[in-house]
């Protein structure tokens, strides 16, 4: 019989405790990229040891700041050209303006007629939003119903009409494809009268099974009674499932045998 290596055997030599020797530790992990990274970091540190350039040129004592050196220089002088056109000369003292010219227009009557026949100036529409009387323009405030006066207000946008037509066309194509697929698969569509007749027949069957289920005895104390009760419950559940499917789907297809 083999002995478990983890279990010590009963021997007199095992009674003396032996010195426990600590197992040697595995060698420490050292990356092969340690030297390369150390050299790169040393280069970066050496280049960033100072603030600014390492060597700065000392300004020469001859390049001192001179007076008016920072002022903007004047534009160069333009040579005068005698051939350029000049302004008209100043009138002489002996020259007098034309006097005595009168207009036949009656400015008083004309101004009065313009005021009487003119349209009164409408005040600028404003609104007040505080009790202290702060006034603001009414038009940019959004309180003026100017959008409902547009000709196309409330009309369906053209892109939505186009999208609805595309959706309708795609639905018609899909319906035609389904009809052709069903015809190829030799499927027959159940008419409304046949669907209603099947539905009424299922309901009538359910009523008969339900009536039979209610006629069971109150105490189910035998195995045949339990089997019959389970059978009736299963039939009622299946009929309810079929009735729900037929009522949910108005279009029903059956395979031709």
Image (cartoon, helix red, strand yellow):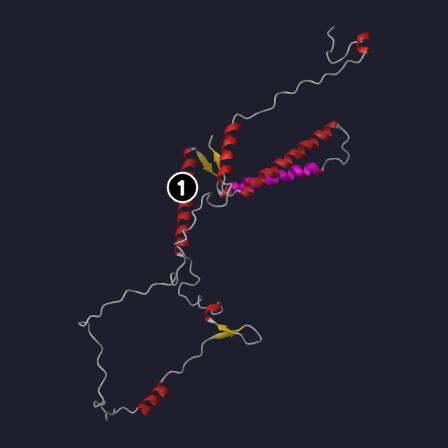
* Near-viewer residue (37 or 148): 37
Q: Which residues are magenta?
A: 194-213
The answer to which quarter of the image holds residue 18 is top right
For this orientation, the residue located farthest to the bottom is 100
Tag 1 residue = 176
Count numbered badges in the picture.
1
Residue 210 within the magenta-colored segment of the rendering: yes
Residue 205 within the magenta-colored segment of the rendering: yes
Residue 11 visible to the viewer: no
Q: Residue at x 33, y 91 (%)?
A: 108
Image position, residue 12 (x, y; %): 82, 7
Q: In the figure, 39 relative to 174: above or below?
A: above
* Near-viewer residue (109 or 47): 47
Q: In the figure, 13 relative to 192: above or below?
A: above
Residue 30 visible to the viewer: yes
Magenta-colored segment: predominant secondary structure: helix
In the rendered image, which quarter contains the N terminus? top right
Image position, residue 86 (x, y; %): 21, 76
Disc 1: CA contacts within 10 A as few (<14), some (14-19) or many (>=20): few
Q: In the figure, 87 relative to 95: above or below?
A: above
Image position, residue 143 (x, y; %): 49, 69
Q: Is residue 89 left or right of residue 138?
A: left
């Amino acid at each position: 019989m083999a002995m478990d290596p983890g279990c010590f055997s009963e021997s007199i030599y095992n009674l003396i405790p032996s010195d426990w020797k600590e197992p040697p530790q595995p060698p420490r992990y050292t990356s092969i990229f340690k030297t390369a990274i150390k050299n790169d970091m040393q280069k970066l540190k050496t280049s960033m040891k100072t603030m600014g350039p390492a060597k700065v040129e000392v300004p020469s004592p001859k390049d001192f700041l001179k007076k008016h050196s920072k002022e903007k220089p004047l534009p160069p002088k333009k040579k005068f050209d005698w051939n350029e056109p000049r302004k008209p000369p100043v009138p002489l003292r002996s020259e007098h303006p034309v006097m005595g010219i009168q207009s036949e227009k009656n400015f008083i009557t004309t101004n009065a007629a313009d005021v009487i026949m003119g349209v009164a100036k409408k005040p600028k529409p404003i609104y007040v939003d505080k009790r202290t009387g702060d006034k603001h323009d009414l038009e940019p405030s959004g309180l003026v119903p100017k959008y409902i006066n547009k000709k196309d207000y409330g009309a369906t946008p053209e892109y939505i009409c186009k999208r609805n037509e595309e959706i309708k066309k795609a639905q018609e194509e899909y319906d035609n494809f389904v009809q052709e697929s069903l015809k190829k698969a030799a499927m027959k569509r159940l008419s409304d009268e046949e669907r209603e007749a099947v539905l009424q027949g299922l309901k009538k069957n359910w009523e008969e099974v339900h009536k039979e289920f209610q006629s069971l005895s109150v105490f189910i104390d035998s195995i045949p009674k339990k089997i019959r009760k389970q059978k009736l419950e299963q039939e009622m559940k299946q009929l309810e499932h079929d009735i729900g499917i037929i009522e949910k789907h108005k279009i029903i297809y059956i395979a031709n045998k």
